[in-house]
Amino acid sequence: MLGTVDKGVKVVRALMPAENVHEEGHERRFLIDAKTTFLLEKQERAGGLKVLGYYHSHPNHPARPSQYDLEASWPGYSYLILSVMNGEPADMTCWVVNEDGSGYDSEEID
């Protein structure tokens, strides 16, 4: 998710889909290719949109971060999760990792 931050409010202006390159299977884990992350950060440093965070789905599971999500996340970024139940969108939530990495705080979606 790319966008701007004004007075602490994040505004998503663009989405850049990224391939899930995780080796253990795409239904239970996600991993964004390091080249994609590097490209986005390079564009941000050149004055482009800020990398606000990442989005992914949880097939047949709640839209809550898993332990794997917590271990793979970075503080300060937003993590939007879409629950997909039986092939249909069900619930969408957003989370930010605590500064110490111990858990998440929910983030409002407007």
Image (cartoon, grey):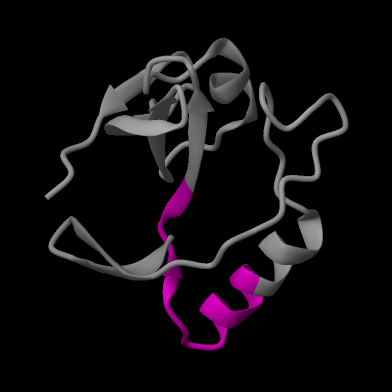
Residue 6 appears at what percent x and percent y? 17, 68
**Relative horizontal placement of residue 29, taking residue 92 as reference (left or right):** right
Quarter in which the N terminus is drawn: bottom left
Q: Is residue 19 above or below residue 90?
A: below
Specify the quadrant of the image occupied by residue 43: bottom right
Residue 45 appears at what percent x and percent y? 56, 79
Q: Is residue 76 above or below residue 50?
A: above
Residue at position x 18%, y 44% from top? 109
Residue 25 appears at what percent x and percent y? 79, 27
Specify the quadrant of the image occupied by residue 8: bottom left
Q: Is residue 38 above or below residue 103?
A: below
**Relative horizontal placement of residue 47, taking residue 108 as reference (left or right):** right
Residue at position x 46%, y 22% from top? 100
Q: Is residue 108 above or below residue 70?
A: below
Residue 75 appears at what percent x and percent y? 47, 36
Residue at position x 46%, y 15% from top? 61
Residue at position x 80%, y 36% from top? 22
Q: How many marks?
A: 0
Q: Is residue 35 magenta?
A: no
Specify the quadrant of the image occupied by residue 105: top left
Q: Nearer the viewer, residue 77 or 13?
A: 13
Q: Is residue 45 magenta?
A: yes
Q: Which residues are magenta?
A: 40-54
